[in-house]
Amino acid sequence: MQAVALPTMESELRALAWATLLTPACAVYARFTARCLRPGIPRLAALLPTFPVFVYMPCMFSSLHLRLFSTFFHTWLATNKLVLLALDLGPLHPRLPLLPFVLCAGLPIKVRLRQSQQQPTKNQPPSSSSPPPPGAEFLRPCARSVLLLSCLTVAYPYTGWLPLYALHYLYCIQIFLTLDLVFSCVMLVSAALMGGESLERQFNTPLAVTSLNGFWGRQWNLMAVDLLRESAYEPVRARWGRDVGVLAAFLMSGLLHELLYWYLTLQQPRGEMLLFFMFHAAFQIAERWARAAGLWRPPKAVAYLLVTAFMVVTIPEMFFGPFVRAGTDVRLKEETMAMVELIWGARKYLLRPFRVASS
């Protein structure tokens, strides 16, 4: 089976340049098309030429990290947003200004309503304090993720004695920190470019999980949750009920993760991602039934231990297993360590303008 080629600086910079050109071009075309055509089949047919571009874009990258983010940003989010745009749904709208439209189309961001646009209530007088600078709320998660990822990179060579489930839990933490770092950096730049627009965070303390419904619905990857809710859950729920809507959303998520598996390994998926998400969907529905019947009301600390144990038991074999067997985890760790070493090795050049003596 063909493997993903090893990345070089030249190949990745070239792929980044193409992605930086193609994504805004497709977004501008989509906005122009949406302003000219009514929602429905005409608008969807006009947007169809952009879909192959976003589907192919991850294949331009050899770095597994960049493939992963391109799959999520372009093949998953951008395509989903454009399909919803064709139906006059989702976060994109033809009346959005050009720059916010382009950024929202190609990046995992969601614009939050400004405080100045909200009607003040009688019990809440307008605040006289000046708002924080654009993106200030994303600086702390950036610094935290960099620090903790560096600690993980240093610790990985000494984790050979850990049991497999503990090592996979470290993988979960690495995935969260990496996604939070990239998303926070994206939002930091986007907020600055859009002149102070308030953006919603994409994670809400996902490691402090006390409920499967809370984790998948209100804590983890909220941009993907919003799109799955509009594209799968809401239409199915309106016709067949809430539980079938949940199954539809998890089914779509499982299929998208099967696609992610193919992009990262170039191997034929075997349905393990789909099985993992459908398994969690069934337990999420069962948890809600038990809570409604009064059978599931444990203390918060007990709920945290039980749900975390459920995650630790199901994630290693069902989610990480296929990637581990394909050697993807080793490749991702090598790329992470190489990036940290590159940044650490470049520190003397970054500090040179400040005339800081090298030790």
Image: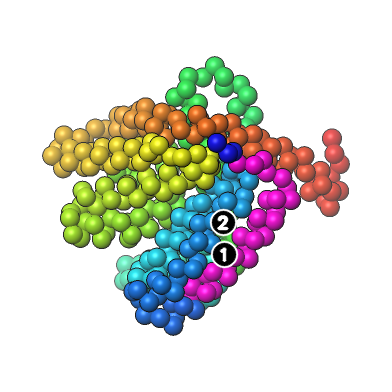
Residue 336 x/y as whole percent: 63, 38
The residue lying at 74 percent from left, 51 percent from top is 10
Q: Main secondary structure of the magenta part?
A: helix
Q: Is residue 12 magenta?
A: yes
**Residue 303, picture quadrant:** top left
- Mark drawn on residue 247: none
Q: Which residue is mark 2?
A: 57
Residue 322: image x %, image y %? 46, 33
- Residue at 49%, 68% (x, y): give it: 49
* Coloring applied to the structure: rainbow
Q: Residues within 10 Å of mark 2 (few under 14, many from 20)?
A: many
Residues at badges 2 and 1 in contact (C-beta under 8 Å)?
yes
Return the residue nearer the eye: 281 or 126.
281
What is the three-letter code of the residue carrying label 2? Met
Q: What residue appears at the point 53 percent right and 42 percent down from the top-left corner?
A: 266
For the point 47% across and 22% down, which residue is it? 164
Q: Secondary structure at mark 1?
A: helix
Q: Is residue 203 left or right of residue 154?
A: left
- In this picture, is 261 found above or below 301? below
Q: Nearer the viewer, mark 2 or mark 1?
A: 2
Name the residue that disc number 1 marks.
23
From where the camera sits, is residue 182 visible? Answer: no
Question: Callout 1, which amino acid?
Answer: Thr
Residue 223 in magenta? no
From the top left corner, tell me how far across and down residue 89 is, in percent.
35, 68
Which residues make up the magenta segment? 4-31
Distance of mark 2 from mark 1, alpha carbons?
A: 9 Å
Disc with the residue nearer the chain's start (2 vs 1) = 1
